[in-house]
Image: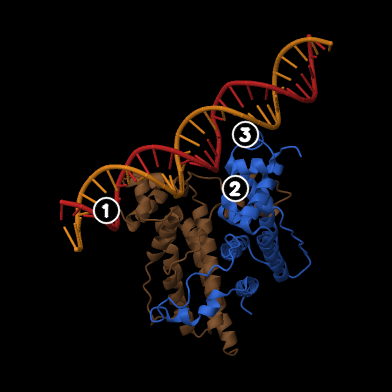
Chain colours: A brown, B blue, C red, D orange
Amino acid sequence: MALSRTSIVEAAIQLIEREGADAVSMRRIAAELGVGVMSLYNHVPNKAAVLDGVAEAVLSKIEFTDDPGAHWTDRVRMQAHAFRQIAHHYPRCTMLVVSRQLHSTAGLLPVERALATLRSAGFDGADAVRILRLFIAFIVGSLLREVGVTPTFAPVQHHTVRAEDLDQALFPEVSALAPLLRSCDHEAEFEFGIELLIRAIAGHLSRKEGTP
Amino acid sequence: MALSRTSIVEAAIQLIEREGADAVSMRRIAAELGVGVMSLYNHVPNKAAVLDGVAEAVLSKIEFTDDPGAHWTDRVRMQAHAFRQIAHHYPRCTMLVVSRQLHSTAGLLPVERALATLRSAGFDGADAVRILRLFIAFIVGSLLREVGVTPTFAPVQHHTVRAEDLDQALFPEVSALAPLLRSCDHEAEFEFGIELLIRAIAGHLSRKEGTP
DNA sequence: CCGTTGCACGTACGGTGTACGTACCTGGGA
DNA sequence: TCCCAGGTACGTACACCGTACGTGCAACGG
């Protein structure tokens, strides 16, 4: 396969998913492609550009199956889940996506869809932007926890601290709720948050249109 | 000053805040302290431990002025803002705090306070944990946007894309709301999100206790 | 036919984390 | 008092990193 920007980015993605973000180096990418290190620089200005490309590529793989006829709450649900699904397909790359601010138009399509949905629901421009930012903050924060819990597919990774060696007098609630804190059904947590947010902004909407 | 783990971590914090996370290296830290590189390893096992120490130290500087007598909504507000204030004092380090999962008890005190507040408000254990995770996700996501917008205190950093070179036919909403998207009053956005979340969980609570 | 252009490549430089061996200085027993 | 054991600071060395630079080859337009 001919060397190209996209083939380099693709190799970087596979390398990240296989061995983690720390393993990414120009030399490793070149070896992956069976090519000299400096040949990469004929297609890519520097390493940062490769990482930008990774974020852009992953982001553009979100599958939006938007149905403009559905109720806006269902559309919001769909878009949130579509955004979240990339974290399952590319868990290691997700950290890159959320921790780099991108300079391309790749991230604009989700934004456009979301704003259109919110506007069609009846929110004015300012509220639509605010609410979009609220959802993005929640989704990004959730993804960060999910991928942080699998830093290197570590076997069992004792969540933070062993239960028995924390002072029950100093942390009564934490030790009482330790089992709940240790385990986390990410799917259910995400669902809970999204549903609560949707209800909240629905209330925000009806409150603005004139309290019923 | 005698070399020690805390002095090394403190030097790392100041270095990060002054020159950014990329500038952090064991050699730079040693130079900062006027000391040989390998002397650091008498007090710290490796670089990752230094970064863990930075996250732990920054997190432990949160000032909680919790008033157990206040209404639980006010206590939640206070704790959320206390958490957020570290992003203002240590913007560059914040990225480290949110992108590393920590293995110490430093992060447990905020968790304990939050759980106690939620329990006193009437939530059961499972809901308290869920709601705490919801708030953390929102706060972390918000901080990530705030610090991401000032990656290196860049002068004006054209937010994502210049307004004029995006296709208004492809992105009608984005281009129409461009001014709103470009500027962001982080304080106001955070306030909006927190208030909406508090109202939402208050509704969640009254709905569980028996709909009024 | 020749010149230009573009791509793959090797070498080299400064920087990184850290394993290892060495020297000092200090404290406690003989 | 002597002596030595341990902790601390240090220098050297190695493998790896990103990438600036110069070289050779193959394709193509004149």
What residue would you read off at disc 1?
Answer: A2
Q: Is residue B45 above or below residue B180?
A: above
Q: Quadrant of the C terminus of chain B?
A: bottom right
Viewer can see residue A126 = yes
What residue would you read off at disc 3?
Answer: B38
| Disc 2 from disc 3: Cα separation | 15 Å
Classify 10 Å Cα crowding around label 3: few (below 14), some (14-19), many (20 and above): few
What residue would you read off at disc 2?
Answer: B24
Q: Residue at x 37, y 55 (%)?
A: A9
| Disc 1 from disc 2: Cα separation | 37 Å
The residue nearer to you, when weighing B18 against A132, is B18
Q: Are marks 2 and 3 on the same chain?
A: yes
Q: How many marks?
A: 3
Q: Residue at x 42, y 64 (%)?
A: A59
The residue nearer to you, when weighing B108 against B45, is B45
Q: Disc 3 residue type?
A: Met
Q: Are marks 1 and 3 on the same chain?
A: no
Residue D20 shown left or right of residue B56 in the figure: left
Q: Is residue B186 above or below residue B1?
A: below
Q: Is the C-beta separation of discs 1 and 2 under 8 Å?
A: no
| Circle 3 SS class | helix
* Dot label at residue B76: none
Q: Residue at x 76, y 62 (%)?
A: B66
Q: Disc 2 residue type?
A: Val
Chain of the residue displaying label 1: A
Q: Are marks 1 and 2 on the same chain?
A: no
Q: Residue at x 27, y 53 (%)?
A: A2
Image coordinates for residue A47, horizontal then vertical, percent = 44, 53
